[in-house]
Amino acid sequence: MAEKTIEKVISPDEKTVFDIFNNNKSYFIDIYQRDYKWGKVYVDTLLQDIELRFELGKREQTDPNYILKDVTANFEPYFLNTFLTHNTSSNTYIVDGQQRLTTFLLILIKIYCLLKDIKSDNKVDTKAYSPEFISKLIFETNPFGETARFKIHNENREAAFKAILDNDLAFQPTDQTQKNIVINYEVISKWYNAYFIKDNEIDRVKLNYYISYIINKLVIIEIEITKPNDVPMIFEVVNDRGMGLKPYEILKGKIIGILEDANKENANNVWINMQNAFYRKGLDIDEFFKMFFRAKFANSELDYKKFEDKYHYEIYRNDSIKKYFGNFRNKKKLYDVLINDINYFANLYIRLKTDDISPYVNYNKLLEQDQQFLLLMSCITYSDKGKDQGKIDAISKKFDQFHSTLRLLDLYESSMFQTYIHILNKGIRNKGIDEAYMLFDKIFISALEILQVIEPGKYSKIEDVYEYERFKNIYNRWLNFSKYVFLRVEIVLSQLLKGKPSYVVNNMSSLEHIFNKTNRKTYALHLEHMYARNEKNNILFTDTDDIFDERLFYSTRNKLGAVLLLKDSHNISSGNDIYADKLAVYSKSDIIWNQILVGHINDIDLKKLPEGFSFKIQKPDTNGLLPLSAIDERQKELFILIKYIWSDTFKNIQM
């Protein structure tokens, strides 16, 4: 019974390379197939395997006519796995195996080029295969003798094949497939040049033997899938059992393979355009699908984990996803989901990741808070298309407030934060801004009540907790976050001072570069401690018994009020100085917050600040030191700005 079933579904046929490529019609690469992704390792392995098998035979003839007979009679065949096809009324499609067949087409093109070189060289009498004979294996021709299409055909690849054939050095690949075609041809070309050419002469006898061998003794089993409805299923099973397709490629075959024939071409074009957009931006499309399915369907930490790695399994198990895709039976719904929802969210993901789409999205990127993208995609719906900017700005801003306030209160803990994200992801899904904000606030306030940071029932919003007593010890615990706080302070000071320029504001277009996440760049932002460890400063932290309080020194030194932001290597140049000797660096730092500290901002500008924004110039004492009392004052002044950024700007927001 099983054998009969297999016979009905598939039909195997043993074919040589000549049988495959001498077919009157080209093999079309099916929409289920992935891009051409073979790299140098795979190509080298194939060439080496062929060479090893070929070298087992003895080459005793020189006449081309006898060479073919010798190979046919005495060389052992080499079986090169299988490839799957299915036929329509007009074309034969490759369902699986196009990586190897595409590489063989490149091999034939290189052989064709070698034969053309031989034909143009009249010095040697030894005959060789004609390039015209090989050309018939490479491409179809139109009635005028021009190249119509290559024998392994996909519209996107024709330009790359033609550029190689024409030796067009100016050709620029437009996607990864074209790039790999060009690169792999170079690999093949170098291999064969080294194998066949010695002292600038092509070994014609060796080449004749080799051509006879590869086209007549290399065997591939063609397995025809006789039932069209089984094509997507067989493709998925074959490629999901160790043959290396990526999840998005299997997902593509699963979706498009089910569609009505009339919709397949447009759906495939939408998918290819989407895929190319990810390639151009250097993004991983599988990472998008993981995030998309998590954003729209993960309701718990366990669900979140299910969409890792082979996430495509989950789309068949999850009832909500199956319903979303019309149980993979409703072809119209499946088509609509692809060309509308998935296409929109893929473009949204690219915009969020790569465009200057919103200041708050950019701010969160500085701290590598990619979970903002999950929450944005959760909250935004397809119906927001064309008007999604409001949600992008609002959710990224609220996320920044939520995350930054936890850190400012020294309550951030990564695993707990991830738990908050899971709750938010489910709770704000497809909701409006006001509902989303309420959930952010509810989760935050509840967390602080549980931790006994605030009184139960007293606060309802994140911005309400900004009271100085709660923030008076804001501390430099995380290097990048501290830099981030001062960067935000600098931006808001520039705004409050009616656009006053500074190093940060003047470089907003390259903010991520100057932020200096790794702290390895010399010409970028660095943290500066106002208290250096030196003998004079040590006096401030030495008690009446002449004992230096190291704990007090480091706790004071790392309060945010005792830390500044400096550009380039300014922090190094003044690193070990006392405060009085640092003032010149601070005044010339082109950082507004530093210049206010040393009195380098004039009174006219300072009057532009809102009422209550009063900042004191901190002068050195008679020993040139910064008094400890100055740090408490700076903590209070910094709190005014922090409160303005993460509290005041959220009050009275019209949703």
Image (cartoon, grey):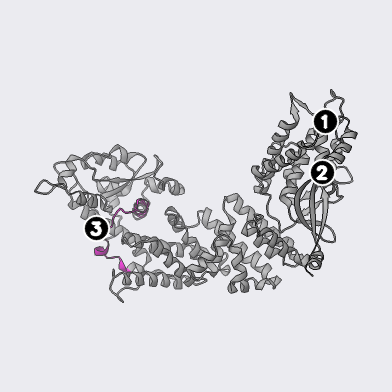
In this view of the protein, which residue sits in the foreground, 77 or 27? 77
Measure how far apart labels 3 and 2 are at the Cα level.
84 Å
Residue 318 makes an appearance in the image: yes
**Secondary element at tag 3:** helix
- Residue 199 in the image: above or below residue 570: above
Residue 624 as seen in the image, left or right of residue 206: left
Residue 205, label in figure:
1
* Residues tagged 3 and 1 counted as in contact (Cβ below 8 A): no
Q: Which tag, 2 or 1, sits closer to the chain's start?
A: 1
Q: Determine the main secondary structure of the stretch shown in magenta.
A: helix
In this view of the protein, which residue sits in the foreground, 10 or 77? 77
* Among the 4 quarters of the image, the one containing residue 332: bottom right
The part of the chain drawn in magenta is: 464-492
Measure how far apart labels 2 and 1 are at the Cα level.
17 Å
Give the residue pinned by disc 3. 636
Q: Of discs 3 and 1, which sits in the foreground? A: 1
Residue 380 makes an appearance in the image: no
- Residue 408 in the image: above or below residue 593: below
**Secondary element at tag 2:** loop
**Secondary element at tag 1:** helix
* Residues tagged 3 and 2 counted as in contact (Cβ below 8 A): no
Name the residue at 87% across, 40% down.
Answer: 73
Amino acid marked by disc 3 = Lys
Q: Which tag, 3 or 1, sits closer to the chain's start?
A: 1
Determine the residue located farthest toward the bottom in the rendered image. 457
